[in-house]
Amino acid sequence: MDDKWLSLTANKWSLVIHEVTNTSATLWFGTLYHNLRKPDKVSIIITKNDDTKVKTLTIKKSDWERPFKDITSQRFYKTKDVKKLESGQRYWIKVVEHLRNTATGNLDEILLARGSFWTLPQEVNSIDQGFTVALGSCFFEEYDGGQVSTSYQSLIASDEAPVRPHITFLAGDQVYLDIGLDSLSPIPKEVRDRVADDYASQWRGLRNVLCHGGTWFLADDHEYWNNYPFVEGFNPFIQALRIPKIKKAWKNTAHDGLVNVQRVQPVRTFKIGNDVSFCIADLRSFRTKTRVLPAAEIETICHWVKGLKSPGVLVLSQPIIEKEGSNSDRNFVSYSKDYNVVVKAIHDASHDVLVLSGDIHYGRICNVEFEGRSNRLYEVVSSPMSNLSGVSSVAVARADKINRLKYFPAIDVNGVTKAAINYNAPWSVSTEFKLFDLRYLRERTKEHFMTLRFNKMDSGELTVEVRAWLCREQRSANGLPKEDWKKPVKLILK
């Protein structure tokens, strides 16, 4: 194997490639662990496929920032923007520390991290066999054992893989900050340290996903606590939130993680030439008791939909084709005012809209044909990458054919006639239950992420091939994760 792919799983450094554009990338490097020293000088070296050096970025000791402002331990990071890159090209990253050798007096280079990324292409057909995005959500690290990272990297490293992701959308619950007895601590410092430690272990578990970008992060409730911003119900792990000083420490530290580590934003958009347009909307981080997003951000989503000149991909923290949530587990549908406006915009769109999401602990694909309209709504949900375990595994789920939603929308939306939802086989990810596997108390959806490959046909239509990759099942012949379906699911977007 090329040493570019050799994993550095033993160290505690994190390299994350955040958003990329046609000509730039945002890099995040640092450590979320509390017991590493700050290097005096670090170089981030960017090269092309032929090892030609493109850029060298430097981080000095005085440059490091704290990811959690109320934690004074040695957790630190720095973001760097790489600019003036070529469109649709692959770049490689090597991060090294320059450390003075006391015996020789020379500056030695210590390798801290490796990674890679693609810049966005001008056309979906101009990169590999088609522009490909990965979609995942819900990662509980306890029994993952590095399998998500290994599966993901094997796809992008192997010449035998049918597709390889160029970018990734992580649609929420990348961390679970409200699971475990340590969430009951009445001491603010312990609460802050627990949040930071959870990020450290989760980011280490996702290492090979995050260092091969770019990655767009969305948040869901477990980035704060179940059903955020509400504190309701009898969930034992959130009862400490009823103490004001604990809630303040928990909320502020969780917010720091979203802003400084995941770098979430309300709404972001980008296009791949004239082929497809993307809108990424975080439906959790900016939620209040009455609005899922500020009114101006909802208007931004609707403006994007109304202005589509090609098929659109709307990436959300929670699915849009869902029943209304309960008071103890509110979803997008629960915020009827905002939900109605977005659904009506999609209904009236000039082009098909494909929604990508997570959250619900099972994977599925469906679509809706609106009455009297030529445009369709498609939805692909990928969840989970790694299931909750132990007593929390009561929250695992599976796609249920009997109880699945039959008509969309589930609530009345002015100007939108309810339409039958199409579930074409295969429409869901398979499940597993082993009686003597005490890690999981119920039948669960198999751990997976999905890839979607976009190609433009001569007719002008956009084909999307969807594959579900099983993180915990590998092919012995080549080490690639197994696909859950015999053939990829093909969608046609107009």
Image (spheres, helix red, strand yellow):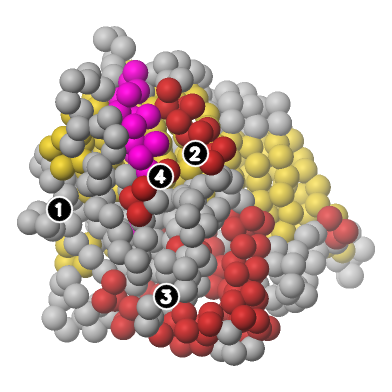
The magenta-colored residue range is: 339-359
Tell me the mark number nearer the camera, choosing from 4 and 2: 4
Q: Which residue is mark 3?
A: 232
Q: CA distance from mark 4 to mark 2?
A: 10 Å
Report the disc number at residue 337.
Answer: 4
Q: Which residue is mark 2?
A: 298
Q: Secondary structure at mark 2?
A: helix
Q: Alpha carbon of mark 4 to alpha carbon of mark 1: how far?
A: 24 Å
Residue at 74% of width from left, 36% of height from top?
55
* Above or below, comparing residue 410 to residue 368 in the picture: below
Q: Give yes or no for residue 44 being in the magenta stretch.
A: no
Name the outermost residue toward the right. 105
Q: Quadrant of residue 129?
A: top left
Q: Are marks 3 and 1 in contact (CB under 8 Å)?
A: no
Cα–Cα gap, marks 2 and 3: 26 Å
**Of 492 and 248, which appears nearest the observer?**
248
User: Mark 4 to mark 3: distance in Å?
Assistant: 22 Å
- Image quadrant assignment for residue 197: bottom right
The answer to whether mark 2 and mark 3 are in CB contact below 8 A is no
What crowding class fits label 2: few (fewer than 14 Cα within 10 Å), some (14-19), or many (20 or more)? Answer: many
- In the drawing, does residue 450 fall left or right of residue 38? left
Mark 1 residue element: loop
Q: Is residue 352 magenta?
A: yes
Q: Which mark is residue 404?
A: 1
Q: Amino acid at mark 1?
A: Arg
Image height of 142 relative to 420, above or below: below
Tag 3 secondary structure: loop
